[in-house]
Image (spheres, coloured by chain):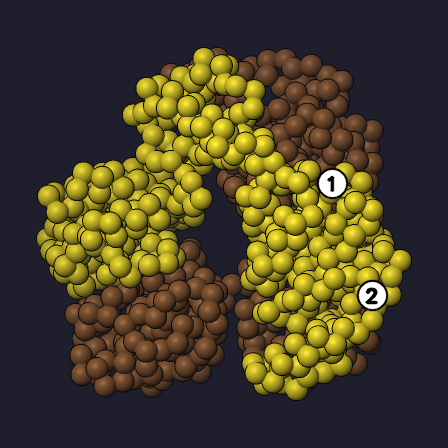
Chain colours: A yellow, B brown
Amino acid sequence: MQAEIITIGDEILIGQIVDSNSAFISKELNKIGVSVYQITSVQDDREHILKSLKEAGERSSVVIITGGLGPTKDDVTKHALCEFFEDELVRDDSVLGHIEELFRKYITTPISDLNREQAMVPSNATVLHNEFGTAPGLWMKKGKTAYASLPGVPYEMRNLIIKSVLPKIIEDYERPHIVHKTIMTYGMGESAVAEKLEDWENNLPSFIKFAYLPNLGSVRLRLSAKGTDKEALMAGIEEQVKKLYPLIGDIIYGEEEEDGRVEKQIGTLLTDKKMSLATAESFTGGSIAERITAVPGASNYFKGSIVCYATEMKVKLLDVPQELIDKHSVVSEEVAVAMANNVKKKLETDFAIATTGNAGPTKGDSDAEVGTVYIGISTPKATFAQKFVMGKHRERVVKKSVNKAFELLYKEILNF
Amino acid sequence: MQAEIITIGDEILIGQIVDSNSAFISKELNKIGVSVYQITSVQDDREHILKSLKEAGERSSVVIITGGLGPTKDDVTKHALCEFFEDELVRDDSVLGHIEELFRKYITTPISDLNREQAMVPSNATVLHNEFGTAPGLWMKKGKTAYASLPGVPYEMRNLIIKSVLPKIIEDYERPHIVHKTIMTYGMGESAVAEKLEDWENNLPSFIKFAYLPNLGSVRLRLSAKGTDKEALMAGIEEQVKKLYPLIGDIIYGEEEEDGRVEKQIGTLLTDKKMSLATAESFTGGSIAERITAVPGASNYFKGSIVCYATEMKVKLLDVPQELIDKHSVVSEEVAVAMANNVKKKLETDFAIATTGNAGPTKGDSDAEVGTVYIGISTPKATFAQKFVMGKHRERVVKKSVNKAFELLYKEILNF
């Protein structure tokens, strides 16, 4: 039982957008035991779409197609589907009613023929109700293979996957369970970790697959198992994870379940402990606050951030003494400590993160080399800052620093 | 002359990572006149990789492969390449020297046999020097088709594309020019725009392709042309763009060239005008500051942000009067105006953006429905706030609001 994904749209092939739909669909399919064999992105081109539909259907039992369902001329998916299924377009009155309702309620421009045309669907297709948009989802079968065609707009697609496509797959197909577990480590390179785990890896039972996922200073270790008995799979993985800890416990900082973002784990800890957090950000420019507040429920523990991008703002908004900056430079341990201390005090929180550094491309208000950063952490007991050299790539310097700040904070919160 | 991209890695097919490499590669190839016909993502599986290499090579002149070059067991790309090219792995001394140098300089753990093995390359491959990592890029030919195999780590891959792969393609292949231009509009739906443009679209010359890209309240219109005479292509597109303005000039807010992010355009304007910006963010939680500071050179005009996530912080950090909040609620036009005014004054800037709203999933410190937001804009002449209803989806509410805030600000800056 495997699936394929076909994403349709010139904008993908010219690199104008990143195809994030595929990752979402793959993750959701995995949760219900369906492996994704291949993801194929093709242009808005009838011949090419037909070829992909055919090839995917020969390999897999379920084919999920996104994109190319818009009302405008450049979208050709629906016509290609008709040709593939030797079908014709007919008007679906419930879809038309829904389109008219959306226009009545939310859209100020009058409904047009183009909009109404979106109610035309292949006569043999089952319509999947698209709550949030005018292009309906479609569910069609050819032999034993099911094809689901969905709009490419991410939130419409997601809603259709969760509410219509997954239930249909669950109803129609027998599926194994797939269980993943990811262990997060930091501070050691991929091959150094691999050497420590050589014996362990060689002795893994055959139903467990193992992979290394290196990313910006951390290496995630993924164990995957597939089979019919979910409990047994989970127990099998747990058994192996237990054996991991004596080998590399010192570099493990968490285990990733459903959603392994460390900021989410920080949120859970802070909520449980009824403790609070603030940030003072210089070169990270609000990135830390942004990641924290992307977690639903962040208002339970996150009070706010002072983004003091300009040096003068560190003095003005955070009361960092000008003399301290003059003496040690704005990119220094002392300034990071002062920022962490002061934002914690000012916002009356239990914990604080502070960042000061130079992300490049040019040197700023200090002599620090591009890539030099200090991350300050303040806890109810103490405040400290650490120096890191994060390379020359602006975007990476910021991302690595945000990750590092969360790691440092996470370890501290565990002590309270 | 067309190319294909094959991205390799189980982490893509289980949805653990979003494949952003493909978009980068596609964009860069387009710039040098190479169209991407298809993007295929496959598992770390020898048979599957072999099949994809063969099929892609039959269709396209250049095949770019990323991923699966790590030092650990789960990475099998190099072995698959050897089989495909009927070649064998031999040690490359310059690669080995580079790996040893990287370890001496940057890596604290000792070098291992696994690391040294990364210097083993197919004997007929041309090595592409990977400055930033231990896995070299490889350039191989089979018949007239060139295959480039690159590590999946984004910054290593990007550097190899720019410094090695593109120059090789330019040297080896005749290519047409591909020119894109994207016009950004807001405030009108895709089909309403399409109706206004119907005649214009029907009269487009055949060498110009046209597409609609709707996204969170804005619709981008993309014109693409492919041919041998770059100047003529650009002139042809310009001619059509000129005809667009009389039809929909009122909803156009910019043209997208190389990098069309509106925050970049704001940055260019502010730098030219020597004017400055600050933000006061509630439910956007630093997202606006993050997007602004992601633009290199933001320190020329961005002073900082007060992220007042908790209601009390609006009073404490931004001097919003408690009575104003009590009277109008924290999610109100009055509070957004006060935030914008006060942050502008406090940080001594020319412009300011402020946000207050409820992104959900539950109601916060106000009675405002989930999705209700106010965006405040302060300019050297005036301050105002507008109300928007952004739907129920937390992530979308934030993204739409950030986009809207930039649009509002952009239009204002044009007046100064």
Tell me if residue B210 comes above or below residue B338 in the rendering. above
Identify the residue shown where x is 34% and y is 23%.
A245
In what quadrant of the picture does the N terminus of chain B appear? top right
Residue type of the residue flagged with mark 1: Ser
Q: Using the image, name the chain to which the residue with label 1 belongs.
A: A
Q: For residue B370, which quarter of the picture?
A: bottom left
**Is disc 2 in the same subunit as disc 1?**
yes
Q: Is the residue marked by circle 1 packed among few (<14), some (14-19), or many (20+) residues within 10 Å?
A: many
In this view, the mark in front (2 or 1): 2
User: Is residue A38 visible in the rendered structure shown here?
Assistant: yes
Picture mark count: 2
Q: Is B37 situated left or right of B352 in this image?
A: right
**Mark 1 and mark 2 in contact (Cβ < 8 Å)?**
no
Residue type of the residue flagged with mark 2: Ser
On residue A104, which mark appears?
none
Whole-percent x and y of residue B32? 69, 49
User: Is residue A365 visible in the rendered structure shown here?
Assistant: no
Whole-percent x and y of residue B65? 66, 35
Q: Residue furthest right?
A: A86
Decide which of tag 2 and tag 1 comes sooner along the chain.
1
Whole-percent x and y of residue A249? 32, 25
Q: Using the image, name the chain to which the residue with label 2 belongs.
A: A
Identify the residue shown where x is 83% and y is 68%.
A89
Q: Name the one closer to the observer, A18 or B127.
A: A18
Q: Which residue is mark 2?
A: A123
Q: Is A100 situated left or right of B70 in this image?
A: right
Tell me if residue A375 comes above or below residue A274 in the rendering. above
Identify the residue shown where x is 20% and y is 49%.
A273
Tell me if residue B73 comes above or below residue B176 in the rendering. above
Distance, label 2 to label 1, CA atoms, is 24 Å
Q: Which residue is mark 1?
A: A60
